[in-house]
Image (cartoon, rainbow, N blue to C red):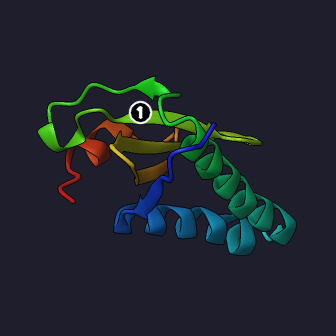
Amino acid sequence: MVRKQVNVCFRTAAREDILRQFRYYLFEKEIPDVAQRFLDAVESAVDLLCRTPGIGAPKQLANPLMAGLRSWPIPGFPAVRVYYICAGNELRIVRVLHGKRDIHPLLEETSE
């Protein structure tokens, strides 16, 4: 069986989210091994989403640009979730957010 090639696109906000969480572990908590493990876990989650893009909990938002939004936990960091949209052969990583944040307004304001 031939698997369809999926193109991954990280939105600017998602890249900033990942960097913010990485810096938190690296500089604020001073645990560089956890910071690296976080980056590896994000990569692992995105790889899984590329292979099985329909997984994850659907999120209903008023913003029509967010139609089809789903979330999936980062392995080993269950409070941090990837918010993504799969459209055709493109996987758009919209945000990567910690559950303690008020995520609903952050996702609604997304305009990219």
Which residue is at the far front?
1
Q: Position of residue 37 (x, y in %)?
A: 79, 60
Residue type indicated by callout 1: Arg
In the rendered image, which residue does mark 1 sit on? 70
Can you say which quadrant of the picture contains the C terminus?
A: bottom left
Q: Residue at x 55, y 46 (%)?
A: 50
Which residue is pictured at 47% across the width and 35% down the height?
A: 71
Q: Quadrant of residue 85?
A: top left
Residue 76 shows in this picture: yes
Q: Residue 9: x percent and y percent?
A: 41, 62
Q: Answer yes or no: is residue 80 visible.
A: no
User: Up-down: is 112 above or below 2?
Assistant: below
Q: Does residue 23 appear left or right of residue 95 in this picture? A: right
Q: Position of residue 103 (x, y in %)?
A: 37, 40
In the rendered image of this protein, does residue 89 appear above or below residue 26? above
Left or right placement of residue 1 versus residue 41 in this view: left
| Category of crowding for the residue at label 1, using alpha-carbon neighbours closer than 10 angstroms: few (below 14), some (14–19), many (at least 20) | many
Query: Which residue, as the protein is rendered here, is positioned at the far right?
Result: 33
Residue 13 picture location, percent across and down: 37, 63
Compared to 35, does 79 lie above or below?
A: above
Q: Secondary structure at mark 1?
A: strand
Q: In terms of depth relative to the viewer, which is nearer, 24 or 71?
A: 71
Task: Specify the quadrant of the image occupied by residue 75.
Answer: top right
- Taking the spot 72% from the left edge, 53% from the top edge, the residue there is 41
| Quadrant (top left/top right/bottom left/bottom right) for the N terminus | top right
